[in-house]
Image: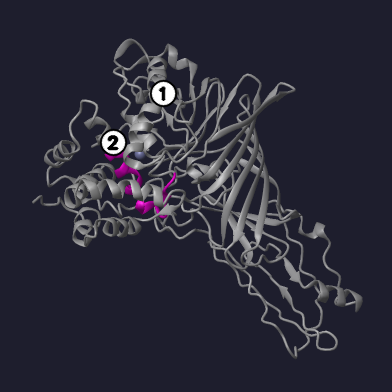
Amino acid sequence: MTSCVLAATGFESWPLLLTLGLLAIGGGTAAWLLLGRRAGRGKTAAFAAIPLLVLALVASGGFAPAPASAAAPCPPGSTPSPMPSTPAPIITPTATPSPVDYQPGAAGIGDAYFPLDGNGGYDVQHYDLDLAYAPDTDVLSGTATVTALATQNLSAFNLDFDTRAVDGTDSITISAVTVNGQAADWSLTSTQISDVTGQPQAAGSTDGDATPPRTELTVIPLAGIDTGASITTTVAYSGVPIEVSDAFGPAGVFATPTGAVVVGQPRVAATWFPSNDHPADKATFSTRMTVPAGLEVIGNGRLAGQSTANGLTTFDWEMEQPMATYLATATLGDYTVTSETGADGITYYDAIDPTLFDRDVDGTPGVKVGDVAKTIFESEPQVISFLSQYFGDYPFSEAGGLAIGYIGEHVDPDTGETVPDDLPYALENQTRPIYPAWAFPADADPSVVVHELAHQWYGDSLSMQRWSDIWLNEGFATYAEWLWAAEHGGPSTQEAFQDAYDSIPETSSFWQTVVADPGAPGIFDGAVYTRGGMTLQALRTEVGDADFFAILKGWATEHAGTAVSTEQFVAYAEQVSGDDLTAFFDTWIYSAGKPALD
Ligand SMILES: [Zn+2]
């Protein structure tokens, strides 16, 4: 992410699972039946049985399995079906295999900054989004299919799906949920989120009531899911997605005059599809979006298909390498699109909001934003070639950019006039970063594009294991800007380092941010960017150019496609350099305070 206002750069408690073990029916044949019961919101649970046992029980008149309709989806708040009231008699087993202990997956993936982000118990492999958007009503509808592997024995699992507005009303309505082809039970639980910290609001806290709650979709399959099993979950839904407004900036699906812009960080994915919404769980994506004919849909990766029927056009975007959820987009509307495969073999797909060709660059009448965007986008192959020297091969087969117009408007309290709003940040959406008008200055300096393209290596191909690792994204993208400037008429990277060091006084709060642990509210602090970039320049000084550039390139290539941590980076830098860098990293990223220079 690049912010336009950057300073220096700018459980619910899970109820008890009652397990009734059983049995041995006939001549030493052991079987078991697992009954799960869930209290809380009173949802019924699934029950699982070994088919042999069911057959035996049915044959003996014990009881019949509940019909499938008994487990049909329940809308929130509905009364659950009761458990079978007369279970089979419990027979003391003579020889029993251990019953499988199915437990619900956790409501969060384990990130202290955003404890409800992501979920436990499974690993998503692929998202298949089959959606439609109606610009006249802003309604998004369709089906998300999430394919995952269970990492524990699951009785239930969560998806993040922010279907509720600030006031708790449903913005999106779920109509059906299935697991592995069978209707599943489900429920929604919403938690108020602080708009200051992004964390669940503490009891009695007065902040945080101006941002939509985090909503967990709990999916309860008919039967327990074994560790390692494939889980294919479908969720059918429809509604007008909520917009998130918090200290991290606006995010979500922004209705525009001709369509919608889909962008945000850290919270965005769950506003438009159910997901394991954390960058540690990357997955491939197929995104089909249907819109009125004449509009464009710009997604991630490769445009695999585009077809029109009955006045509607469906775009099929395929992101064939793993992607963090927040990097997904399906921005749509009226766009001027160009697509071309470069000499480097990369397909460049660029889109510019046509209103930008009529809009002056701020402060420079006569220079149009759209023209500057076009010029800068034409330099993408040059930027990627430049960055590849240092970072290794560009990690994807596609690249490009998306220049967007206004995302909304507000009334100026002083003048009473309606003022249009630009997105206050640019974002490194995988293969297709999103840029607001201010990213395209009159002198066509591409530094914002350099920043977001650098993220394709650091942030996208390598994503964060935890949000506290975000300097691995922003410090590296900042350093990429310095590398670019150094060879394009700007200061050397050492001069950029020294300028920052000298210009920020020791008393500045800038030096109080711990780069590798900036705190949830601090993930976009200027220090994450600038001190992060300074750390890399200081590392270059510490280990020398040869080792430094080997670290930079090797880090990106050896960890391509994975989620990485600061600890891994430190270990890698030590491995490549052969140096003990404990004191160095303690000073630069694990401590507050202005480092002393030798
Ligand atoms: Zn960034």
Query: Is the residue marked by circle 2 packed among few (<14), some (14-19), or many (20+) residues within 10 Å?
Result: some
Coloration of the structure image: one colour
Q: Quote the CA–CA distance across marks 1 and 2.
A: 23 Å
User: Which of 381 and 60 lies nearest the eye of the viewer?
Assistant: 381
Which residue is the extreme one toward the bottom? 94
Look at the image and give the residue range highlighted in magenta.
461-481
Disc 1: which residue = 377
Image quadrant assignment for residue 380: top left
Q: Is residue 126 above or below residue 109?
A: above
Establish whether ligand 1 lies closer than 8 Å to the Cβ of label 2. no
| Residue shown at 54% from the left, 21% from the top | 257
Residue 212 visible in this rendered orientation of the protein:
no
**What residue is shown with label 2?**
6
**What is the x, y in percent for residue 498?**
14, 40
Name the front one of labels 1 and 2.
1
Amino acid marked by disc 2: Leu
Query: Residue 482: where, in percent of width, then height?
Result: 25, 35
Mark closest to the chain's N terminus, 1 or 2: 2
Quarter of the rendering containing residue 427: top left
Under mark 1, the amino acid is Phe
Mark 2, secondary structure of its residue: loop
